[in-house]
Every structure is written in structure tokens, then in C-alpha cells.
Amino acid sequence: MINTTIFGAELKRIGFEFYSGVPCSYLKDLINFAINECEYVTASNEGEAVAIAAGAAIGGKKAVVLMQNSGLSNAVSPLVSLIYPFQIPILGFVSLRGEPGLSDEPQHELMGQITPQMLSIMKIKWEYLSSDFEEVRRQLERANQCIENNESYFFIVKKGTFEPVVLVEKQMKKSITIVKREKVTDDQLPSRYEALRMINSLKDSETIQLATTGKTGRELYELEDACNNLYMVGSMGCVSSLGLGLALTRTEKMIIALDGDGSLLMRMGNLATNGHYSPPNLLHILLDNHIHDSTGGQHTVSHNVNFVDVAASCGYAHSIYVHNLEELEKCIKSWKQHPKLTFLYLKIAKGSKKGLGRPNIKPHEVKERLQVFLDD
């Protein structure tokens, strides 16, 4: 077995102090160490953890994700359509439940057989974590070299690898909603392009705009391709989690996550995580047209959801129904003057700008110029 405290200290020595993950009995002691000694963000699911770590990595931190291999399937989308195209390096630890030859629960049997192949298919470099600490040091150096070359690296962890670490109990903070405003008048229903134009017009040298996948990113790109914009080309549902990781890491910047109803519905657990950690420099704007506009206009189920209520219940300090562009402008200016974790909900018209193109800049180039902007 590995002395977990010494192992964690070695990770800290080479710069890994930001963690996000989902609990696993095989990894519990490493998780306990991270909670006790580092910055640890508890995610609602594994894909969310990957996106949070990605945001932290873009912000300049070496980030670690921890998950059970059953959750590796939940993380596939951000691993292949966020981490890979944007070349965002994260260090991963995945437990090997269902290891061939060992008795385990039936739900782990197949995943235990295919975990290594899944990582290889996703073009993620990996190896089994050794139980010999001198070899572990060499493994971590190999992993760190990959991370510094913008390549992710994962370790598969077998049962009984880590020595026990007692979790230091910490009082859970209570997130309080200060402002909640529901619908009180008719909706103006601007187009998405008009809404984005308003949001973009208020951008300054301290603001970063993250646009969810599909027409939102494409329209923002057409409005203005700027070095402080990031257009998510995949990983649907992960934009606010990426924003959370970035906001926690770069507290001096103002982060705007531009979301869509189909996207947010896909990973609504993100709201609870955002609400718990409550970075004041994160503004989450939902543009809701009740359809999947990028894929043919099929209806979502957002007409049945009171997102303002949900965000408030999840701990957003401000959760506000916005009826028109004038209110949207006032709310964004107010957030910049008095930052609190804020959720703005605006209904928009169906459809998109005619003749809409796609970004002609590669995702990793978008990330790299954003990192230059962050460090200026």
C-alpha cells in the first residue's frame, strides 16, 4: 500500500493542489487527503468534475479528477469533446472496480474489463498506479511531463492501493439566496443574437465569456471573435462547470457562462455545485427558447421548469427572471458592481441568425489565447 499522505505531498510538490471528483471507496483516502489538505470541489457527477478541473486548468492550476470507473462513462463527453479538442491537461485517478479475477458487484463486471480500453480509445495516456513508492515517484514524473505538454494522464487504481486517511470534519456552509425575482410582466422575446449583442457590448478587459455548444457559441463568434471568449464546441451541459473551475481559480476576473435550456437540462446537478461553492465572480445566464435550435428545432421540456426557482433553491445568491434586454443590461451592470453568484433567466425567440458560420479558429488556439489574456 502507498502512504497516502506522502503520496499527496508528492503531488503537491509538483504542483497538483486543485481536485474535483465523485466519491469512490477505492479512492476515499486520496479524496480525504485532498479535502483535508488541498482545494477540493465535490461534483455531482464525473463529467461535471472533468469540466470543473478543465476550468481550473485553463486558469493556470494543475488539476486532478477522481472517480470510480463506473463513472468514467459519465465523463466521456467532456473527455472527448472538451479535454481532447481544447488540449486541456488534467491528471486523473480512476478506480478499478470489477477487476478481472476478483469478486465484485455485478454492475462493475463489464466496466472492470473495459476500463483500460476506454482510456486508450479516448487517446488518454494511462498506466496502473504502482504500490511501490519509488516507482510511484517515477510514474508521477512521467504524468507531470505530459501535463506540462498539454496532455492529460490517468492512473488506474486497484483495490487496497492507498493507506487510510481520516477525514477532518468541516462545517458545511449554508448558501443563502439574497434576491429572487420571478416573472411579473410579458416577455420581450429578443433573438439570441440580440441578447448576445447586448451581453457582449458590456464586456470589458476583466470579463471572460464562455458560450455553450451550438448556435450560442457560433453567434457569439460572429458578433465578435475576441481573445476573452471561449466557444464550447462539445461537452454539452458543461459550460457553467467550466465557469466554476475558472471562477474559483481566477478570482480577479469576471466569468460569464452563457447557457441554453437544452444544455442546462442535460446537467442540472451543476446548479447545486455552483450554488454550494458560490464564487461571486460567476454570472450564469440562461437563454431559453424551449428548443434544441442547433439540431433542428426539437422541443426541450424547459417550458415545465421554473429555472429561477431551481437556481435559488440550489444556493445562487441572486436568481432573477429577466423580461427584456433593458433588464438584462441593468442586471449585468449590477453584478459587475456588486458581485454575487448570479443566475439570469431570459426567454428568447426561436431560430438563429441566417447564414450563420462556424469558428475558423481551432479549439486549442481559443484556449491558448484565453490563457494569454488571463496572464496579461
Image: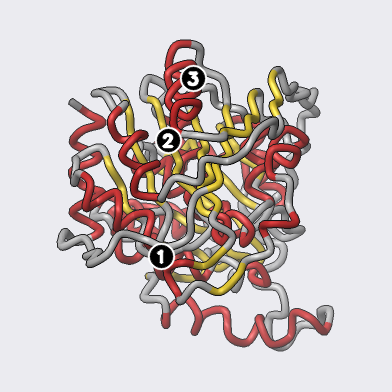
Q: Earlier in the sequence, mark 3 or mark 1?
A: 1
Residue at disc 1, secondary structure: loop
The dot on residue 256 is: 2
Q: Earlier in the sequence, mark 2 or mark 1?
A: 1
Question: What amino acid type is highlighted by mark number 3?
Answer: Trp
Quadrant of image for the N terminus: bottom right
Side of 129 relative to 276 (left or right): left
Counting the numbered discs, the total is 3
Quadrant of image for the C terminus: top left
Q: Position of residue 60 (x, y in %)?
A: 33, 36
Residue 52 visible in the picture: no
Q: Position of residue 7 (x, y in %)?
A: 54, 45
Q: Position of residue 12 (x, y in %)?
A: 46, 36
Mark 2 and 1 residues: CB-CB less than 8 Å, in contact? Answer: no
Alpha-carbon distance for marks 3 and 1? 28 Å
> Which residue corresponds to mark 3?
335
Q: Name the residue at 72% across, 60% down.
A: 26
> Which residue corresponds to mark 1?
234
Quadrant of res 101: bottom right
Q: Pick the residue in front: 243 or 15.
A: 243
Q: Pick the residue in front: 368 or 254.
A: 254
Structural crowding at the residue carrying mark 1, measured as other residues with C-alpha within 10 Å and reported as few (<14), some (14–19) or many (≥20): some
Mark 3 and 1 residues: CB-CB less than 8 Å, in contact? Answer: no
The dot on residue 313 is: none
Alpha-carbon distance for marks 2 and 1? 18 Å
Structural crowding at the residue carrying mark 2, measured as other residues with C-alpha within 10 Å and reported as few (<14), some (14–19) or many (≥20): many
Q: Pick the residue in front: 195 or 88.
A: 195
Question: What amino acid type is highlighted by mark number 2?
Answer: Ile
Q: Name the residue at 18% across, 46% down.
A: 225
Q: Is residue 17 above or below residue 30?
A: above
